[in-house]
Amino acid sequence: MSVNIIINNMEVNVPRDTTILDAAKKIGIKIPTLCYLADLQNPGSCRMCIVEVEGAKALQPSCVTKVSEGMNIRTNTKKVRDARKIILELLLSDHPWECNTCDRNQSCELQKLADEYGINEVRFQSVRERMPLDESTPGIIRDPNKCILCRRCVSVCQDVQGVDTLAPRARGFDTIIAPGQGDMLSEAVCVQCGQCAAVCPVGAISEKDDIDKVWEAIDDPNKFVVVQTAPAIRAALGECFDLKPGALIKGKMTTALRRLGFDKVFDTNFTADLTIIEEGTELLTRLKKALVDKDKNVALPMFTSCSPGWVNYMESFYPELIPNVSTCKSPQQMFGAVAKTYYASKVDKKKEDIIVVSIMPCTAKKFECNRDEMNDSGVKDVDYVLTTRELGKFIKQAGIDFINLPDEEMDAPLGTSTGAADIFANTGGVMEAALRTAYEIVTGKELPFKGLHIAPIEGLKGVKEASLKIEGTTKEWRFLEGVTLDVAVAHGLGNAKKLIESIKSGEKSYHFIEIMACPGGCIGGGGQPRMTTDAIRQARINAIYKEDEGRKFRKSHDNPAIKEIYEEFLIKPLGEKSHHLLHTTYTNKKEPSPKK
Protein backbone atom coordinates (compact mmCIF):
# COMPACT_ATOMS: atom_id res chain seq x y z
CA MET A 1 0.00 0.00 0.00
CA SER A 2 1.28 3.45 -0.88
CA VAL A 3 0.74 6.87 0.63
CA ASN A 4 0.77 10.41 -0.73
CA ILE A 5 3.03 12.92 0.99
CA ILE A 6 4.47 16.35 0.31
CA ILE A 7 8.17 17.15 0.57
CA ASN A 8 9.24 20.76 0.01
CA ASN A 9 5.95 21.45 -1.79
CA MET A 10 6.43 18.47 -4.11
CA GLU A 11 3.92 15.62 -4.10
CA VAL A 12 5.28 12.10 -3.99
CA ASN A 13 3.69 8.65 -3.76
CA VAL A 14 5.73 6.01 -1.90
CA PRO A 15 5.14 2.69 -0.11
CA ARG A 16 3.76 3.08 3.42
CA ASP A 17 6.86 1.69 5.17
CA THR A 18 9.26 4.12 3.42
CA THR A 19 11.36 6.44 5.57
CA ILE A 20 11.33 10.17 4.95
CA LEU A 21 15.01 9.91 3.96
CA ASP A 22 14.28 7.37 1.20
CA ALA A 23 11.18 9.25 0.06
CA ALA A 24 13.26 12.40 -0.34
CA LYS A 25 15.87 10.51 -2.36
CA LYS A 26 13.15 9.42 -4.77
CA ILE A 27 12.58 13.02 -5.86
CA GLY A 28 16.23 14.06 -5.80
CA ILE A 29 16.35 15.73 -2.40
CA LYS A 30 19.54 15.06 -0.47
CA ILE A 31 19.28 14.96 3.31
CA PRO A 32 22.65 14.84 5.13
CA THR A 33 23.54 11.78 7.22
CA LEU A 34 26.49 10.50 9.26
CA CYS A 35 25.31 7.40 11.10
CA TYR A 36 23.10 6.02 8.32
CA LEU A 37 24.23 3.03 6.21
CA ALA A 38 21.93 1.99 3.38
CA ASP A 39 20.37 -1.47 3.87
CA LEU A 40 22.21 -1.93 7.16
CA GLN A 41 21.61 0.55 9.94
CA ASN A 42 19.60 3.69 10.54
CA PRO A 43 19.84 4.32 14.30
CA GLY A 44 18.97 8.00 14.10
CA SER A 45 21.79 8.68 16.54
CA CYS A 46 23.67 11.51 14.83
CA ARG A 47 20.52 13.57 14.14
CA MET A 48 22.04 15.20 11.07
CA CYS A 49 19.07 14.03 9.01
CA ILE A 50 16.43 15.93 11.00
CA VAL A 51 13.54 17.48 9.10
CA GLU A 52 10.45 19.50 9.95
CA VAL A 53 7.16 17.59 9.83
CA GLU A 54 3.96 19.62 9.99
CA GLY A 55 2.16 18.93 13.26
CA ALA A 56 5.13 17.29 14.99
CA LYS A 57 6.30 18.90 18.25
CA ALA A 58 9.98 18.46 17.43
CA LEU A 59 12.27 17.96 14.44
CA GLN A 60 12.21 14.36 13.24
CA PRO A 61 15.18 12.12 12.24
CA SER A 62 14.33 11.25 8.65
CA CYS A 63 16.31 8.00 8.55
CA VAL A 64 13.99 6.32 11.09
CA THR A 65 10.71 8.20 10.66
CA LYS A 66 8.24 6.42 8.41
CA VAL A 67 5.91 8.34 6.13
CA SER A 68 2.14 8.49 6.62
CA GLU A 69 -0.73 9.61 4.43
CA GLY A 70 -0.83 13.39 3.94
CA MET A 71 2.47 14.03 5.74
CA ASN A 72 3.88 17.48 4.93
CA ILE A 73 7.67 17.60 5.24
CA ARG A 74 10.21 20.39 4.88
CA THR A 75 13.89 19.53 4.72
CA ASN A 76 15.52 22.93 4.39
CA THR A 77 13.84 25.46 6.69
CA LYS A 78 15.83 27.90 8.81
CA LYS A 79 14.93 25.85 11.88
CA VAL A 80 16.33 22.70 10.27
CA ARG A 81 19.49 24.40 8.99
CA ASP A 82 20.22 26.01 12.34
CA ALA A 83 19.72 22.72 14.17
CA ARG A 84 22.05 20.87 11.81
CA LYS A 85 24.70 23.55 12.28
CA ILE A 86 24.51 23.19 16.06
CA ILE A 87 24.83 19.40 15.72
CA LEU A 88 27.93 19.86 13.56
CA GLU A 89 29.41 22.36 16.01
CA LEU A 90 28.87 19.94 18.88
CA LEU A 91 30.53 17.11 16.94
CA LEU A 92 33.43 19.34 15.95
CA SER A 93 33.89 20.60 19.50
CA ASP A 94 34.97 17.10 20.54
CA HIS A 95 36.89 16.42 17.34
CA PRO A 96 40.66 16.98 16.99
CA TRP A 97 41.51 19.92 14.76
CA GLU A 98 43.99 17.93 12.70
CA CYS A 99 42.35 17.99 9.28
CA ASN A 100 45.49 18.83 7.32
CA THR A 101 47.38 15.89 8.80
CA CYS A 102 44.50 13.45 9.03
CA ASP A 103 44.34 10.35 6.84
CA ARG A 104 40.81 11.37 5.82
CA ASN A 105 41.58 14.97 4.84
CA GLN A 106 39.36 15.86 1.85
CA SER A 107 37.58 12.51 2.08
CA CYS A 108 36.01 13.01 5.51
CA GLU A 109 32.22 13.10 5.70
CA LEU A 110 32.24 15.36 8.77
CA GLN A 111 34.63 17.79 7.10
CA LYS A 112 32.49 17.83 3.96
CA LEU A 113 29.30 18.59 5.91
CA ALA A 114 31.05 21.34 7.89
CA ASP A 115 32.04 22.93 4.59
CA GLU A 116 28.59 22.53 3.07
CA TYR A 117 26.92 24.16 6.08
CA GLY A 118 29.42 26.99 6.29
CA ILE A 119 30.79 26.16 9.75
CA ASN A 120 33.57 28.72 10.22
CA GLU A 121 33.61 28.76 13.99
CA VAL A 122 32.79 26.39 16.84
CA ARG A 123 31.25 28.04 19.86
CA PHE A 124 31.67 25.10 22.22
CA GLN A 125 34.76 23.85 24.01
CA SER A 126 35.62 20.21 24.52
CA VAL A 127 36.36 18.88 27.99
CA ARG A 128 37.37 15.42 26.79
CA GLU A 129 40.81 14.11 27.67
CA ARG A 130 43.00 12.89 24.81
CA MET A 131 42.98 9.11 24.49
CA PRO A 132 45.90 7.01 23.16
CA LEU A 133 45.94 5.63 19.62
CA ASP A 134 45.49 1.92 19.18
CA GLU A 135 48.32 0.90 16.84
CA SER A 136 48.59 -2.61 18.24
CA THR A 137 47.76 -4.54 15.05
CA PRO A 138 49.58 -4.67 11.69
CA GLY A 139 46.56 -3.72 9.63
CA ILE A 140 44.35 -1.22 11.45
CA ILE A 141 44.78 1.94 13.53
CA ARG A 142 42.02 3.07 15.85
CA ASP A 143 41.91 6.72 16.95
CA PRO A 144 39.15 7.11 19.57
CA ASN A 145 39.68 10.88 19.65
CA LYS A 146 38.19 11.21 16.18
CA CYS A 147 35.25 8.89 16.78
CA ILE A 148 31.83 10.58 16.45
CA LEU A 149 29.93 7.58 17.92
CA CYS A 150 28.00 6.98 14.68
CA ARG A 151 28.17 3.19 15.30
CA ARG A 152 28.68 2.31 11.65
CA CYS A 153 31.71 0.20 12.56
CA VAL A 154 29.71 -1.54 15.29
CA SER A 155 26.96 -2.41 12.84
CA VAL A 156 29.37 -3.85 10.28
CA CYS A 157 31.41 -5.75 12.86
CA GLN A 158 28.36 -7.23 14.56
CA ASP A 159 25.62 -7.49 11.94
CA VAL A 160 27.61 -8.14 8.75
CA GLN A 161 30.74 -9.90 9.95
CA GLY A 162 29.41 -11.42 13.17
CA VAL A 163 32.74 -10.91 14.90
CA ASP A 164 31.42 -8.58 17.63
CA THR A 165 34.78 -6.98 18.34
CA LEU A 166 33.55 -3.38 18.46
CA ALA A 167 30.73 -2.08 20.64
CA PRO A 168 29.82 1.00 22.67
CA ARG A 169 31.58 0.92 26.05
CA ALA A 170 30.59 2.97 29.12
CA ARG A 171 27.63 5.34 29.02
CA GLY A 172 26.67 8.93 28.37
CA PHE A 173 29.50 11.39 27.97
CA ASP A 174 32.05 8.63 28.66
CA THR A 175 30.87 6.40 25.80
CA ILE A 176 33.57 5.10 23.46
CA ILE A 177 33.53 2.55 20.63
CA ALA A 178 36.10 -0.08 21.48
CA PRO A 179 36.78 -3.79 21.84
CA GLY A 180 36.26 -5.51 25.19
CA GLN A 181 36.56 -3.19 28.12
CA GLY A 182 38.38 -0.62 26.05
CA ASP A 183 41.14 -3.11 25.19
CA MET A 184 43.54 -2.77 22.29
CA LEU A 185 42.52 -4.55 19.07
CA SER A 186 45.47 -6.93 19.47
CA GLU A 187 43.94 -8.14 22.75
CA ALA A 188 40.55 -8.78 21.16
CA VAL A 189 39.28 -11.23 18.58
CA CYS A 190 39.70 -9.00 15.53
CA VAL A 191 40.05 -10.67 12.13
CA GLN A 192 41.56 -7.48 10.60
CA CYS A 193 39.06 -7.49 7.72
CA GLY A 194 38.94 -3.69 7.76
CA GLN A 195 35.23 -3.41 7.07
CA CYS A 196 35.07 -1.01 10.03
CA ALA A 197 37.62 1.24 8.31
CA ALA A 198 35.67 1.00 5.06
CA VAL A 199 32.52 2.52 6.59
CA CYS A 200 33.95 4.96 9.14
CA PRO A 201 32.90 8.48 8.06
CA VAL A 202 35.92 10.14 9.68
CA GLY A 203 39.49 9.13 10.60
CA ALA A 204 38.64 7.09 13.68
CA ILE A 205 39.53 3.75 12.05
CA SER A 206 41.91 3.40 9.12
CA GLU A 207 44.55 1.13 7.68
CA LYS A 208 48.12 1.40 8.98
CA ASP A 209 49.96 3.49 6.40
CA ASP A 210 53.14 1.87 5.02
CA ILE A 211 53.82 4.27 2.13
CA ASP A 212 56.93 5.78 3.73
CA LYS A 213 58.44 2.31 4.25
CA VAL A 214 57.93 1.51 0.58
CA TRP A 215 59.48 4.85 -0.46
CA GLU A 216 62.48 4.00 1.72
CA ALA A 217 62.89 0.62 0.02
CA ILE A 218 62.60 2.13 -3.49
CA ASP A 219 65.18 4.78 -2.61
CA ASP A 220 67.67 2.15 -1.36
CA PRO A 221 70.07 1.39 -4.26
CA ASN A 222 70.94 -1.96 -2.68
CA LYS A 223 67.38 -3.26 -2.84
CA PHE A 224 65.57 -4.79 -5.81
CA VAL A 225 61.96 -3.84 -5.23
CA VAL A 226 59.18 -5.74 -7.00
CA VAL A 227 55.46 -5.12 -6.71
CA GLN A 228 52.50 -7.47 -7.10
CA THR A 229 48.93 -6.28 -7.66
CA ALA A 230 45.80 -8.18 -6.64
CA PRO A 231 43.09 -8.68 -9.29
CA ALA A 232 40.55 -6.51 -7.43
CA ILE A 233 42.76 -3.43 -7.73
CA ARG A 234 42.28 -3.09 -11.50
CA ALA A 235 38.53 -2.54 -11.11
CA ALA A 236 38.69 -0.09 -8.19
CA LEU A 237 41.85 2.04 -8.26
CA GLY A 238 40.33 4.37 -10.84
CA GLU A 239 37.87 5.58 -8.19
CA CYS A 240 40.81 7.24 -6.41
CA PHE A 241 41.10 9.43 -9.51
CA ASP A 242 37.37 10.14 -9.94
CA LEU A 243 36.75 7.41 -12.51
CA LYS A 244 33.54 5.42 -12.30
CA PRO A 245 33.47 2.20 -10.23
CA GLY A 246 34.47 -0.70 -12.43
CA ALA A 247 36.75 1.33 -14.71
CA LEU A 248 39.50 -1.07 -15.81
CA ILE A 249 42.88 0.61 -15.36
CA LYS A 250 45.36 -2.28 -15.38
CA GLY A 251 47.55 -0.73 -18.09
CA LYS A 252 47.66 2.71 -16.45
CA MET A 253 48.31 1.13 -13.04
CA THR A 254 51.26 -0.79 -14.49
CA THR A 255 52.73 2.39 -15.95
CA ALA A 256 52.21 4.28 -12.68
CA LEU A 257 53.96 1.57 -10.68
CA ARG A 258 56.97 1.70 -13.02
CA ARG A 259 57.14 5.47 -12.69
CA LEU A 260 57.01 5.15 -8.92
CA GLY A 261 60.34 3.35 -9.21
CA PHE A 262 59.57 -0.34 -8.77
CA ASP A 263 62.20 -2.49 -10.46
CA LYS A 264 59.63 -4.98 -11.72
CA VAL A 265 55.85 -4.83 -11.94
CA PHE A 266 54.26 -8.24 -11.44
CA ASP A 267 50.80 -9.65 -10.86
CA THR A 268 49.34 -11.57 -7.93
CA ASN A 269 47.26 -13.21 -10.67
CA PHE A 270 50.30 -15.32 -11.53
CA THR A 271 50.15 -17.01 -8.15
CA ALA A 272 46.34 -17.05 -8.23
CA ASP A 273 46.81 -19.39 -11.20
CA LEU A 274 49.41 -21.28 -9.18
CA THR A 275 46.94 -21.53 -6.29
CA ILE A 276 44.38 -23.15 -8.58
CA ILE A 277 46.85 -25.83 -9.65
CA GLU A 278 47.85 -26.60 -6.06
CA GLU A 279 44.40 -26.26 -4.52
CA GLY A 280 42.67 -28.15 -7.33
CA THR A 281 45.15 -31.01 -6.97
CA GLU A 282 44.61 -30.98 -3.21
CA LEU A 283 40.82 -31.25 -3.67
CA LEU A 284 41.13 -34.10 -6.18
CA THR A 285 43.57 -35.90 -3.87
CA ARG A 286 41.12 -35.65 -0.97
CA LEU A 287 38.26 -36.90 -3.14
CA LYS A 288 40.34 -39.87 -4.29
CA LYS A 289 41.18 -40.82 -0.72
CA ALA A 290 37.53 -40.59 0.26
CA LEU A 291 36.04 -42.38 -2.76
CA VAL A 292 38.74 -44.91 -3.70
CA ASP A 293 40.63 -45.55 -0.49
CA LYS A 294 37.45 -45.26 1.58
CA ASP A 295 39.39 -43.16 4.08
CA LYS A 296 36.80 -41.90 6.56
CA ASN A 297 39.29 -39.46 8.06
CA VAL A 298 39.54 -37.32 4.93
CA ALA A 299 38.54 -33.77 5.84
CA LEU A 300 35.66 -32.84 3.56
CA PRO A 301 34.30 -30.41 2.64
CA MET A 302 37.51 -28.59 1.75
CA PHE A 303 37.46 -24.82 2.28
CA THR A 304 39.46 -22.24 0.32
CA SER A 305 42.25 -20.42 2.14
CA CYS A 306 43.04 -17.29 0.10
CA SER A 307 41.14 -14.83 2.35
CA PRO A 308 43.21 -14.00 5.46
CA GLY A 309 40.19 -12.47 7.19
CA TRP A 310 38.37 -15.78 6.80
CA VAL A 311 41.42 -17.73 8.01
CA ASN A 312 41.64 -15.49 11.10
CA TYR A 313 37.92 -15.97 11.72
CA MET A 314 38.17 -19.74 11.33
CA GLU A 315 41.12 -19.97 13.72
CA SER A 316 39.24 -17.96 16.36
CA PHE A 317 35.67 -19.25 16.02
CA TYR A 318 35.82 -22.62 14.24
CA PRO A 319 39.30 -24.10 14.83
CA GLU A 320 37.79 -27.57 14.47
CA LEU A 321 37.73 -26.79 10.73
CA ILE A 322 41.51 -26.43 10.49
CA PRO A 323 41.86 -29.89 8.83
CA ASN A 324 39.20 -28.90 6.28
CA VAL A 325 40.87 -25.70 5.13
CA SER A 326 43.17 -25.99 2.13
CA THR A 327 46.81 -25.86 3.15
CA CYS A 328 47.54 -23.54 0.21
CA LYS A 329 48.91 -20.15 1.13
CA SER A 330 47.06 -17.20 -0.32
CA PRO A 331 48.24 -15.99 -3.75
CA GLN A 332 49.93 -13.02 -2.03
CA GLN A 333 52.07 -15.25 0.13
CA MET A 334 52.78 -17.75 -2.63
CA PHE A 335 54.05 -14.83 -4.71
CA GLY A 336 56.48 -13.72 -2.02
CA ALA A 337 57.91 -17.21 -1.61
CA VAL A 338 58.27 -17.67 -5.37
CA ALA A 339 59.76 -14.20 -5.92
CA LYS A 340 62.49 -14.76 -3.33
CA THR A 341 63.43 -18.24 -4.56
CA TYR A 342 62.51 -19.07 -8.16
CA TYR A 343 62.62 -15.52 -9.49
CA ALA A 344 65.67 -14.56 -7.41
CA SER A 345 67.65 -17.35 -9.05
CA LYS A 346 66.50 -16.29 -12.55
CA VAL A 347 67.76 -12.72 -12.06
CA ASP A 348 70.76 -13.67 -9.92
CA LYS A 349 69.64 -11.73 -6.85
CA LYS A 350 70.01 -12.63 -3.20
CA LYS A 351 66.65 -13.17 -1.55
CA GLU A 352 67.71 -10.78 1.21
CA ASP A 353 68.04 -8.01 -1.37
CA ILE A 354 64.61 -8.49 -2.91
CA ILE A 355 61.78 -6.48 -1.41
CA VAL A 356 58.26 -7.65 -2.24
CA VAL A 357 55.49 -5.06 -2.03
CA SER A 358 51.84 -6.10 -2.40
CA ILE A 359 48.98 -3.88 -3.54
CA MET A 360 45.88 -5.39 -1.97
CA PRO A 361 42.22 -4.48 -1.46
CA CYS A 362 42.50 -5.84 2.06
CA THR A 363 43.80 -4.69 5.45
CA ALA A 364 44.00 -8.32 6.63
CA LYS A 365 46.79 -8.84 4.08
CA LYS A 366 48.96 -6.54 6.24
CA PHE A 367 48.34 -8.94 9.12
CA GLU A 368 48.89 -12.01 6.95
CA CYS A 369 52.33 -11.02 5.68
CA ASN A 370 53.46 -10.63 9.29
CA ARG A 371 52.36 -14.10 10.40
CA ASP A 372 55.28 -16.00 11.92
CA GLU A 373 55.01 -18.89 9.46
CA MET A 374 55.19 -16.73 6.31
CA ASN A 375 58.94 -16.95 5.76
CA ASP A 376 59.43 -20.20 3.86
CA SER A 377 61.76 -18.51 1.40
CA GLY A 378 64.22 -18.17 4.27
CA VAL A 379 63.34 -14.51 4.83
CA LYS A 380 60.04 -12.68 5.22
CA ASP A 381 58.14 -13.63 2.05
CA VAL A 382 56.17 -10.38 1.62
CA ASP A 383 57.70 -7.24 3.08
CA TYR A 384 55.00 -4.56 2.79
CA VAL A 385 51.33 -4.35 1.87
CA LEU A 386 49.60 -1.23 0.59
CA THR A 387 45.83 -1.03 0.19
CA THR A 388 44.12 0.33 -2.92
CA ARG A 389 43.55 3.59 -1.06
CA GLU A 390 47.24 3.81 -0.14
CA LEU A 391 48.30 3.21 -3.75
CA GLY A 392 46.02 6.07 -4.81
CA LYS A 393 47.78 8.38 -2.32
CA PHE A 394 51.20 6.99 -3.32
CA ILE A 395 50.62 7.86 -6.98
CA LYS A 396 49.41 11.36 -6.08
CA GLN A 397 52.46 11.93 -3.86
CA ALA A 398 54.68 11.23 -6.85
CA GLY A 399 52.85 13.81 -8.97
CA ILE A 400 51.83 11.24 -11.57
CA ASP A 401 49.00 12.25 -13.91
CA PHE A 402 47.24 8.91 -13.66
CA ILE A 403 44.31 9.59 -15.99
CA ASN A 404 46.56 10.47 -18.93
CA LEU A 405 49.06 7.64 -18.53
CA PRO A 406 49.64 5.27 -21.46
CA ASP A 407 48.90 1.58 -20.95
CA GLU A 408 51.83 -0.77 -20.37
CA GLU A 409 52.17 -4.52 -19.87
CA MET A 410 53.36 -6.24 -16.71
CA ASP A 411 56.73 -7.94 -16.59
CA ALA A 412 57.29 -11.62 -17.31
CA PRO A 413 57.25 -14.24 -15.98
CA LEU A 414 55.47 -13.31 -12.73
CA GLY A 415 53.18 -10.91 -14.55
CA THR A 416 51.70 -13.56 -16.83
CA SER A 417 48.22 -14.77 -15.88
CA THR A 418 44.79 -15.89 -17.05
CA GLY A 419 41.18 -14.81 -16.80
CA ALA A 420 40.64 -17.44 -14.13
CA ALA A 421 43.02 -15.48 -11.92
CA ASP A 422 41.19 -12.22 -12.62
CA ILE A 423 37.94 -13.54 -11.18
CA PHE A 424 39.60 -14.29 -7.83
CA ALA A 425 38.50 -10.71 -7.12
CA ASN A 426 34.81 -11.63 -7.07
CA THR A 427 32.77 -13.70 -4.67
CA GLY A 428 32.44 -17.09 -6.38
CA GLY A 429 35.47 -16.41 -8.56
CA VAL A 430 37.91 -18.70 -6.79
CA MET A 431 35.39 -21.53 -6.97
CA GLU A 432 34.73 -20.93 -10.67
CA ALA A 433 38.45 -20.73 -11.45
CA ALA A 434 39.09 -23.97 -9.57
CA LEU A 435 36.29 -25.80 -11.35
CA ARG A 436 37.42 -24.57 -14.78
CA THR A 437 40.69 -26.40 -14.20
CA ALA A 438 39.58 -29.38 -12.09
CA TYR A 439 36.75 -30.34 -14.46
CA GLU A 440 39.03 -30.19 -17.51
CA ILE A 441 41.74 -32.21 -15.79
CA VAL A 442 39.23 -34.93 -14.90
CA THR A 443 37.24 -35.03 -18.15
CA GLY A 444 39.50 -33.50 -20.77
CA LYS A 445 36.61 -31.18 -21.65
CA GLU A 446 35.79 -27.56 -20.85
CA LEU A 447 33.44 -26.73 -18.01
CA PRO A 448 29.91 -27.14 -19.44
CA PHE A 449 28.65 -23.66 -18.63
CA LYS A 450 28.04 -20.79 -21.03
CA GLY A 451 31.15 -18.63 -21.27
CA LEU A 452 32.77 -20.76 -18.54
CA HIS A 453 30.65 -18.85 -16.00
CA ILE A 454 28.82 -20.76 -13.26
CA ALA A 455 25.78 -18.51 -12.85
CA PRO A 456 24.46 -19.97 -9.55
CA ILE A 457 27.61 -18.92 -7.66
CA GLU A 458 27.88 -15.44 -9.17
CA GLY A 459 26.28 -12.28 -7.78
CA LEU A 460 25.78 -10.79 -4.34
CA LYS A 461 23.53 -13.35 -2.67
CA GLY A 462 25.14 -14.10 0.71
CA VAL A 463 25.29 -17.90 0.40
CA LYS A 464 25.30 -19.56 -3.02
CA GLU A 465 25.52 -23.18 -4.08
CA ALA A 466 25.84 -25.26 -7.23
CA SER A 467 26.06 -28.90 -8.27
CA LEU A 468 28.14 -30.27 -11.12
CA LYS A 469 27.77 -33.85 -12.35
CA ILE A 470 31.06 -35.25 -13.61
CA GLU A 471 30.65 -37.30 -16.77
CA GLY A 472 33.07 -38.65 -19.38
CA THR A 473 36.13 -38.87 -17.16
CA THR A 474 39.54 -39.97 -18.38
CA LYS A 475 40.92 -43.32 -17.22
CA GLU A 476 42.98 -41.81 -14.40
CA TRP A 477 39.92 -40.17 -12.87
CA ARG A 478 37.37 -42.94 -13.53
CA PHE A 479 36.47 -43.04 -9.83
CA LEU A 480 34.77 -39.64 -10.25
CA GLU A 481 32.53 -40.81 -13.11
CA GLY A 482 28.93 -39.94 -12.31
CA VAL A 483 29.83 -38.14 -9.06
CA THR A 484 27.86 -34.95 -8.42
CA LEU A 485 30.21 -32.36 -6.99
CA ASP A 486 28.38 -30.08 -4.56
CA VAL A 487 29.93 -26.68 -3.93
CA ALA A 488 29.03 -23.59 -1.93
CA VAL A 489 30.17 -19.97 -1.75
CA ALA A 490 29.78 -17.44 1.07
CA HIS A 491 30.97 -13.85 1.31
CA GLY A 492 30.91 -11.76 4.47
CA LEU A 493 31.70 -13.61 7.67
CA GLY A 494 28.12 -13.46 8.93
CA ASN A 495 27.13 -15.49 5.87
CA ALA A 496 30.08 -17.81 6.43
CA LYS A 497 28.75 -18.54 9.92
CA LYS A 498 25.29 -19.38 8.54
CA LEU A 499 26.84 -21.77 6.02
CA ILE A 500 29.09 -23.47 8.56
CA GLU A 501 26.26 -23.91 11.04
CA SER A 502 24.07 -25.47 8.34
CA ILE A 503 26.84 -28.02 7.70
CA LYS A 504 27.38 -28.74 11.38
CA SER A 505 23.66 -29.34 11.89
CA GLY A 506 23.58 -31.82 9.00
CA GLU A 507 21.22 -29.65 6.99
CA LYS A 508 23.76 -29.17 4.19
CA SER A 509 26.59 -31.22 2.71
CA TYR A 510 29.25 -30.13 0.22
CA HIS A 511 32.59 -31.19 -1.24
CA PHE A 512 34.20 -27.78 -1.75
CA ILE A 513 33.47 -24.35 -0.23
CA GLU A 514 34.76 -20.86 -1.02
CA ILE A 515 34.63 -18.24 1.72
CA MET A 516 35.62 -14.60 1.39
CA ALA A 517 35.68 -12.41 4.48
CA CYS A 518 34.42 -9.25 2.79
CA PRO A 519 31.00 -8.63 1.22
CA GLY A 520 31.35 -9.11 -2.52
CA GLY A 521 34.74 -10.75 -2.11
CA CYS A 522 37.97 -8.84 -2.65
CA ILE A 523 36.24 -6.20 -4.77
CA GLY A 524 34.53 -5.15 -1.51
CA GLY A 525 37.70 -5.39 0.59
CA GLY A 526 38.37 -3.21 3.62
CA GLY A 527 41.13 -1.34 1.77
CA GLN A 528 39.11 -0.39 -1.31
CA PRO A 529 38.00 3.19 -2.12
CA ARG A 530 35.13 4.36 0.10
CA MET A 531 32.12 4.02 0.17
CA THR A 532 31.44 0.57 -1.19
CA THR A 533 27.75 0.02 -1.79
CA ASP A 534 26.21 -3.02 -3.47
CA ALA A 535 25.86 -1.01 -6.68
CA ILE A 536 29.59 -0.27 -6.60
CA ARG A 537 30.40 -3.89 -5.78
CA GLN A 538 28.36 -5.04 -8.76
CA ALA A 539 30.05 -2.54 -11.09
CA ARG A 540 33.46 -3.83 -10.03
CA ILE A 541 32.31 -7.45 -10.39
CA ASN A 542 31.05 -6.80 -13.92
CA ALA A 543 34.35 -5.19 -14.85
CA ILE A 544 36.34 -8.18 -13.57
CA TYR A 545 34.25 -10.60 -15.64
CA LYS A 546 34.79 -8.36 -18.66
CA GLU A 547 38.55 -8.51 -18.03
CA ASP A 548 38.37 -12.30 -17.82
CA GLU A 549 36.36 -12.63 -21.01
CA GLY A 550 38.90 -10.58 -22.97
CA ARG A 551 41.83 -12.82 -22.08
CA LYS A 552 43.68 -15.14 -24.46
CA PHE A 553 43.92 -17.77 -21.71
CA ARG A 554 40.99 -18.19 -19.31
CA LYS A 555 42.00 -21.33 -17.40
CA SER A 556 44.87 -21.46 -14.93
CA HIS A 557 46.40 -24.66 -16.31
CA ASP A 558 46.79 -22.96 -19.71
CA ASN A 559 49.11 -20.27 -18.31
CA PRO A 560 52.49 -20.85 -20.06
CA ALA A 561 54.39 -19.27 -17.16
CA ILE A 562 52.76 -21.71 -14.74
CA LYS A 563 53.80 -24.63 -16.92
CA GLU A 564 57.31 -23.21 -16.96
CA ILE A 565 57.64 -22.86 -13.19
CA TYR A 566 56.68 -26.50 -12.69
CA GLU A 567 59.09 -27.67 -15.40
CA GLU A 568 62.00 -25.57 -14.10
CA PHE A 569 61.43 -25.41 -10.37
CA LEU A 570 58.42 -26.87 -8.59
CA ILE A 571 58.40 -30.19 -10.52
CA LYS A 572 54.81 -31.16 -9.61
CA PRO A 573 51.76 -29.94 -7.66
CA LEU A 574 51.87 -30.95 -3.98
CA GLY A 575 55.47 -32.01 -4.51
CA GLU A 576 58.22 -31.52 -1.94
CA LYS A 577 59.20 -28.03 -3.09
CA SER A 578 55.58 -26.94 -3.49
CA HIS A 579 54.75 -28.24 -0.05
CA HIS A 580 57.61 -26.28 1.50
CA LEU A 581 57.06 -22.98 -0.30
CA LEU A 582 53.38 -22.81 -1.15
CA HIS A 583 51.57 -24.49 1.73
CA THR A 584 51.12 -23.59 5.39
CA THR A 585 49.56 -24.55 8.70
CA TYR A 586 46.97 -22.86 10.92
CA THR A 587 46.62 -22.12 14.63
CA ASN A 588 43.83 -22.79 17.10
CA LYS A 589 43.21 -19.33 18.54
CA LYS A 590 40.02 -20.23 20.34
CA GLU A 591 41.73 -22.08 23.15
CA PRO A 592 44.14 -20.08 25.33
CA SER A 593 47.80 -20.90 24.82
CA PRO A 594 49.26 -23.07 27.59
CA LYS A 595 51.30 -21.18 30.13
CA LYS A 596 55.02 -21.69 29.85
Image (spheres, helix red, strand yellow):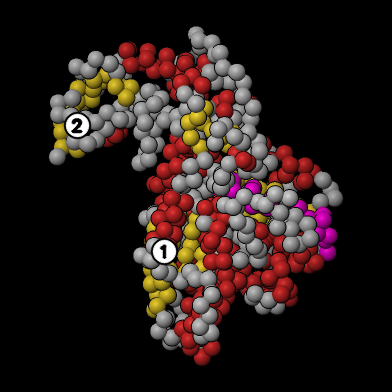
- Height in image: 498 above or below 115? below
Q: Position of residue 164 (x, y in %)?
A: 48, 42
Q: Which residue is mark 1?
A: 503
Closest to the camera, between mark 1 and mark 2, is: 1
Instruction: Determine whether the residue tagged by mark 2 lies in a helix, strand or loop.
Output: strand
Q: Which residues are magenta?
A: 348-371
Instruction: Determine whether the residue tagged by mark 1 lies in a helix, strand or loop.
Output: helix
Q: Is residue 229 magenta?
A: no
Q: Residue at x 48, y 54 (%)?
A: 521
Pick whichever, 400 or 13, lies toward us: 13
Q: Residues within 10 Å of mark 1 (few under 14, many from 20)?
A: some
**Residue 391, quarter of picture:** top right
Q: Position of residue 1 (x, y in %)?
A: 14, 40
**Which kind of residue does numbered mark 1 sit on?**
Ile
Taking the image as drawn, is residue 363 in sight?
Answer: yes
Q: Position of residue 593 (x, y in %)?
A: 65, 51
Q: Position of residue 369 (x, y in %)?
A: 67, 52
Choose the circle earlier in sequence order: 1 or 2. Answer: 2
Disc 1 to disc 2: CB gap under 8 Å: no
Q: Which residue is mark 2?
A: 12
**Which kind of residue does numbered mark 2 sit on?**
Val
Q: Residue at x 53, y 62 (%)?
A: 321
* Residue furthest to the bottom: 475
